[in-house]
Image (cartoon, rainbow, N blue to C red):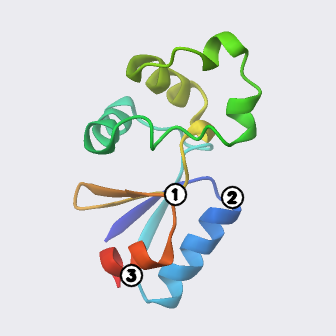
Amino acid sequence: MLTMFGIKNCDTIKKARDWLESHGVAYAFHDYKASGIDRAVLEGWVGQVGWEPLLNRAGTTFKKLPDADKEKLTEKKAIALMLAQPSMIKRPVVEKRGKIVVGFKPDIYEKAYG
C-alpha cells in the first residue's frame, strides 16, 4: 500500500487521488497541514530527491515569506521552512516501500503505480 502526503483541499491532490482511485490503487492519505510532518520523514525524502524538488516555491505560503527567508536557501533552511509550514512541501508526495514520487503527472503515476 502507498501513502499520499499532501493537503486535502489542494487541486493537484484531488487530481492525484482521482487517478489512483480510477486505477484501483489503494492508498492512505496523510494531510500534513492538519497532522504535520515528521522531521525524519522529511529528511528521508530530501535524502532521496534533494530539497529543491520538495520545496514548493510557486505556492502562496512561500511567496508571502520575507525576502530574507527566501534568499540563500540551503538544505537546512529549506527543511526548517517546510517543517514550520508544511504547505510549502510540493504536493503530492507519494511513498511506496520507502520510495517517493513528488508531484503529479499521469504518465509517471502509470509507470510507478499502473
Q: Nearer the viewer, mark 3 or mark 2?
A: 3
Which residue is found at the position 43% from the left and 89% from the top?
A: 24
Vertical arrangement, residue 36 with respect to residue 2, above or below: above
In the image, residue 40 sits, relative to residue 111, either above or below, namely above
Left or right? Give the position of 65 relative to 89. right
Amino acid type, label 1: Pro
Task: Give whichever of discs 3 and 2 has the lower sequence position.
Answer: 2
Cα distance in 3D space between marks 1 and 2: 9 Å
| Mark 1 in CB contact with mark 3 (< 8 angstroms) | no
Judge whether residue 51 can be spotted in this image: yes
Q: Tell me the quarter of the image containing the C terminus.
A: bottom left
Residue type highlighted by circle 2: Cys
**Residue 108: percent from left, percent from top:** 40, 72
Q: Which x, y percent locates residue 103?
A: 50, 58
Q: Dot 2 lies on which element?
A: loop
Label 3 SS: helix
Report which residue position mark 2 lands on. 10
Res 26 visible: no
Pointers 1 and 2 in contact (CB under 8 A)? yes
Q: Quadrant of the N terminus?
A: bottom left
Q: Residues within 10 Å of mark 1 (few under 14, many from 20)?
A: many
* Sequence-first disc among 1 and 2: 2
Using a 10 Å C-alpha cutoff, classify the residue at mark 2 as few (fewer than 14 neighbours), some (14 to 19) or many (20 or more): few
Residue on which the image places disc 3 = 110
Tell whether 88 sits left or right of 99.
right
* Spatial separation of the CA atoms under disc 3 and disc 2: 21 Å
Element class at badge 1: loop
Q: Nearer the viewer, mark 1 or mark 3?
A: 3
Q: Is residue 108 above or below residue 85?
A: below
Residue at x 52%, y 66% (from the top left corner): 104
The label on residue 92 is 1
Q: Which amino acid, mark 3?
A: Glu
